[in-house]
Image (cartoon, rainbow, N blue to C red):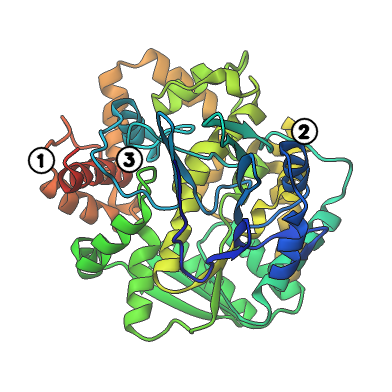
Amino acid sequence: MISIQLTYQHKNYWKKQGHISILGNIIIEDKFLAIEKQFEYFQLIQNESTFLDAIKKIDGHFSILMETSEYIFIAVDAIRTFPIFIKQKKNDIYICDHIVPNNDTLNIQASADFEKIYCTQENDTLLNDWLQLRAGEYVVINKEQHSVQFKSYFKHSEKTSAINIKEAERKMIANAIAYANNRTILIPLSGGYDSRYLLALLIENAYTKIECFTYGKQDTFEVNIAKKVCEQLNIKWHFIEYTDELLQSFFSASWAEYSMMNHHFTSLPHEQDFFALHYLKNKNALQKDTVVMNGFCQDLLAGSYLEPINNFKLSDYVYEKYNVQIDSKKYDNTWLGFQDWFAKNRLSKFIINSVRVYEYFDLDFYLPFWSKEWVRFWNNKSYKERYRQEFYHQYLFDGLFKKYNIGIKKTATEQRGRWYYFKKIGKNILPDSFVKYIQLQNSKNQNKDVNNTLYLYNKIYEQVKDKPIEKDFRINNIHARYFLQTLKNKYNL
C-alpha cells in the first residue's frame, strides 16, 4: 500500500492535475511559470532520468510529487522550503507534508542532535521510521519493488560559470520583484547588512511599496541603525519593543498552536519574529496582501563562517563547534563542504523553516538570496574574497550603501576574524572552567541582550522539568529542551 496525504494549505497550496502535484512556485530561465505551464513542464516525464533533468533546470520555492505507472518521483527545492516526509513499514509506504504520529517512538540520537543544532540531521526526524527529503534532494519510489531511494540533485558547494555580480544581482532582484507583483513587501530590518542590502536593491530598482519592521529593546544598536536607514530612505518603519509582557505570549494558546503546527518533528520553531507579528496583527498593522522578504543568511554566502584554520577537517570542525557527529562522507572536506552541510541541515531546517511564522499570520514570503545561481555565484569567490566577507562588505559600502547614504557600520562583532587566533590560544591554555565562566558572562550580559531574551530564558527555564546542570542563558538551548519536553508529553514519546 502507498498512502499519499498532501494537505498543505496556506498562501501557497498544493495544485493537482492528473498524476502531478505541485506546491509553491517554479522559476525556469529567470521567469516564473504559470501553474498551467508548470504542469506542462512535467507532463511528459516517464523515468528518473527525465525527472532529474527537469528539476535540475528549475528554481524557486517548491515541492513536487508525480506518479507514473511504475514510479513515484518527489522533489523539494534547494532549501527545502516545503518539507516532505516518508515512512516505510514493510511493503507500506506513507508520504505526507505533515506527520501525524501513530504509535511512533522517539529517535534518541536525533533528539540529542536537536538539542545542539535545533533541528535533526540529514534525513532523520525526531520519530523513528519517519524520514524527510533534505534540501536539494529527490526521491524515487519503485511501486512494484516497494523501494525508496533518496538522492541529491543540488549541492550548496556548487560553482557556476563566469558571471559578474551585477548580472547575478539583476536576475536575483528581478525575480523578487516579479514575485511581489506590486504587493507590499515587508522586510524584517535588523542593524546588519543583509536586510539593508535587500532594501537598497528594491529602492535601486524603483520598487516603492515597501515597509520594514524591527524588534527588540529600545535604543539598541540594531534598532537605532534600522531606524536611521528607514528615515534616510523614507520607508515606513514599525518598531516593536520586546517588553516582558509581549514575550509572555510565548506561553499563549496562539504560540502553542503555531509551535505544534510547524515543527514537523524536525525543527525548533522560531520565536523571534512571532512576537513582532503577533503585536502587529493585534494592532491591525499587517496589510492583507503582503509578501515578507528577508536577508536570511546572505552573510553565510559572503563567507561569514570562514575561519583562519590550518589543516581543516570538516568532521572535527563541526564536532568542536556544535558537538555533533556528522556523516562526513556526504560532504567535501572543504569550507564549501561545511556550507553544504550547514545548508542541508541547520539552515534549511531551523533558519529557513522560520518562514512558517509568516504563514501562520497569513502572510506570503519569498527568499531572494537563495536562488541556485546566486548561491553558485558566491561559491565562485575565493577564500580571500570571502574571509571576513571582504568582497561583500566592500561591494556594499562602495556601492549602494554609499549611493543612498546608509553605510552605517555595525558594532565590533565584525572584528571576530581579527581576534580569532587570540581566542583560540586563550581557549587552549586557560582552564576549561575559566573559559566557561567568560562565555557565561557574555551570555548573560544585559548590554548584549538586544531582544530581551534573558527574560524569556528565565521564564522558560522555570517551566523545564529536566533542567540543565547549569544555566547557559542561550535562548535556543533552553527552548529546545522545553520543546522536546512538550513534544514528549503531548505524544507520549
Question: Where the C terminus falls, by quadrant?
Answer: top left
Nearest the viewer among 78 and 169 is 78
Identify the residue at horizontal 30%, vertical 32% (top origin): 111
User: Whole-percent x and y of residue 451?
Assistant: 34, 59
Task: Give x and y (percent) for residue 140.
Answer: 61, 36
Residue drawn 66% across the image and 46% down it: 68
Where is residue 257 drawn, in percent x and y?
27, 63
**Nearest to the observer: residue 77 or residue 191:** 77
Please indicate, yes or no, whether residue 435 appears anywhere in the rendered image. yes
Residue type for callout 3: Asn
Circle 2 SS class: loop
Identify whether 46 is placed above or below 417: below
- Near mark 1 (Cα within 10 A), the count class, few <14, some 14-19 or many ≥20, is few
Residue at 76 percent across and 66 percent down: it is 37
- The residue at which mark 3 appears reads as 442
Going from the N terminus, do you reach mark 1 or mark 3 first? 3
Q: Which mark is residue 382?
A: 2
Q: Give coordinates of residue 5: x percent, y percent.
A: 44, 54
* 429 up-or-down from 94: above or below: above
Task: From the image, state whether disc 3 or disc 2 is nearer to you.
Answer: 2
Using the rendered image of the protein, determine whether residue 405 is visible from the camera's viewpoint: no
